[in-house]
């Protein structure tokens, strides 16, 4: 099949949507499909469209549906789609109505959709290949956060939590990710000046980010809104436990019984978990064991299989 794969962000943004699109294009090409990955649909003929982000990709979704009303259209719902836009944005809601199938990136995503839409929704967990561990630093307990500095990620919650740690703690925290505006950049500069345990590493190539991850003791994901975080897949691939905000998108990735949740936006609870991870070997082992159990859902062969099965639902209908 000829597939148009639409993503609202190109490779220069280096964000989760782009990584998902690049990975899916590879999986589909390996299955014999011809795939064009585009930020905006160029109008060329395609048997099927897969569009990431109901709101941001709405123009492409609407144009394809009008040109080819009987050809399959698959819309992948992100965090801002699921937990904000489909409840209040007309373009996002129109995308839902036009789609033949919806995709969510973790099991809890279906809970945001009514019964009419849930029946046409598929769950495809994102994935990462195994990441070889590097030796952890002995002099500090290194904690990592990864992601661009933007409001939905609550990026300074970890910084605030480090201020509450006791003096004897060896925790040092690093945040890797680009500030998306001057205000965020200024806040990050102020935070690392006043909070000696927290450092802003800025944007790095993906390979360098994974090298940091491979030696980290813990990954912190403090987001207020997530559809299914790529960084959780990568942390589990590197055998790094996660401390995550207690939001549906993270529960859908890590499971309801995961012991590493803290209330979103509450730094003192995050600080308590950080200290337990550093000082309580039993708690750390529990985090690691739960993370290893969830890893099976996020392997590349699983993601590729679910994606190919989804496309196969339409192969007999395309002429």
Image (cartoon, grey):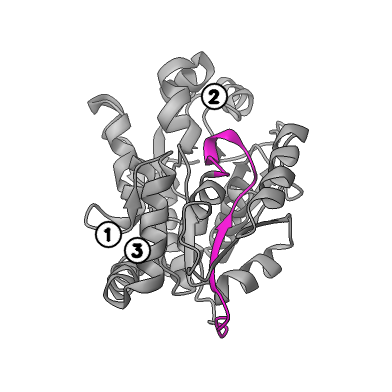
Q: Which residues are magenta?
A: 134-156
Farthest-out residue, front: 167
Front-most of residues 146 and 275: 275
Secondary structure, mark 1, is loop
Q: How many numbered marks have been drawn onto this rendered protein structure?
A: 3
**Does label 1 or label 2 sit earlier along the sequence?**
2
Tell me residue 186's x, y (percent): 75, 38
Local packing at callout 2 (Cα closer than 10 Å; few below 14, some 14-19, many 20+) is some
Q: Is residue 220 left or right of residue 134?
A: left
Which residue is identified by label 1? 259
Q: Does the residue at mark 3 contact the one at mark 2 (Cβ under 8 Å)?
A: no
Measure the alpha-carbon separation of dots 1 and 3. 18 Å
Secondary structure, mark 2, is helix
Tell me residue 303's x, y (percent): 43, 60
Question: Compared with residue 290, is residue 176 higher up or lower down, i.e. above or below?
Answer: above
Which residue is identified by label 2? 65
Secondary structure, mark 3, is helix
Query: Residue visible at 27% across and 59% down?
Result: 259
Q: Is residue 239 left or right of residue 6?
A: left
> Of the residues tagged 1 and 2, which is closer to the observer?
1
Question: Compared with residue 112, is residue 76 higher up or lower down, i.e. above or below?
Answer: below
Give the dominant element type of the magenta stretch: helix, strand or loop: loop
Q: Does the residue at mark 1 contact the one at mark 2 (Cβ under 8 Å)?
A: no
Query: Residue visible at 41% across and 30% down?
Result: 83
**Does label 3 or label 2 sit earlier along the sequence?**
2
Tell me residue 12's x, y (percent): 77, 48
Local packing at callout 1 (Cα closer than 10 Å; few below 14, some 14-19, many 20+) is some
Which residue is identified by label 3? 297
């Amino acid at each position: 099949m000829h597939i148009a794969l639409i993503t609202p962000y190109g490779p220069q943004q280096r964000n989760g949507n782009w990584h998902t699109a690049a990975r899916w294009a590879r999986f589909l090409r390996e299955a014999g499909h011809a795939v064009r990955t585009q930020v905006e649909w160029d109008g060329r003929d395609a048997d099927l469209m897969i569009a990431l982000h109901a709101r941001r990709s709405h123009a492409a979704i609407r144009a394809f549906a009008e040109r080819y009303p009987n050809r399959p259209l698959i819309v992948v719902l992100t965090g801002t789609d699921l937990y904000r836009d489909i409840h209040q944005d007309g373009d996002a809601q129109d995308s839902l109505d036009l789609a033949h199938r919806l995709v969510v990136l973790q099991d809890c995503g279906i809970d945001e959709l009514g019964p009419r839409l849930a029946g046409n929704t598929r769950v495809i967990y994102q994935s990462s290949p195994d990441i070889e561990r590097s030796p952890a630093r002995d002099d500090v307990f290194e904690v990592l956060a990864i992601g661009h500095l933007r409001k939905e990620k609550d990026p300074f919650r970890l910084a605030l939590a480090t201020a509450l740690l006791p003096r004897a703690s060896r925790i040092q925290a690093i945040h890797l990710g680009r500030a998306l505006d001057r205000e965020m950049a200024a806040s990050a500069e102020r935070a690392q000046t006043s909070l000696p345990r927290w450092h802003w590493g800025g944007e790095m190539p993906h390979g360098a980010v994974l090298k940091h991850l491979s030696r980290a003791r813990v990954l912190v994901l403090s987001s207020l809104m997530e559809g299914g975080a790529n960084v959780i897949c990568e942390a589990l691939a590197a055998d790094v436990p996660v401390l995550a905000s207690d939001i549906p998108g993270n529960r859908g990735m890590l499971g309801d019984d995961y012991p590493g949740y803290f209330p979103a936006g509450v730094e003192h609870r995050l600080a308590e978990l950080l200290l337990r991870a550093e000082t309580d070997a039993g708690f750390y082992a529990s985090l690691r064991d739960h993370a290893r159990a969830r890893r099976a859902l996020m392997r590349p062969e699983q993601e590729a299989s679910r994606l190919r099965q989804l496309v196969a639902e339409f192969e007999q209908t395309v002429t």
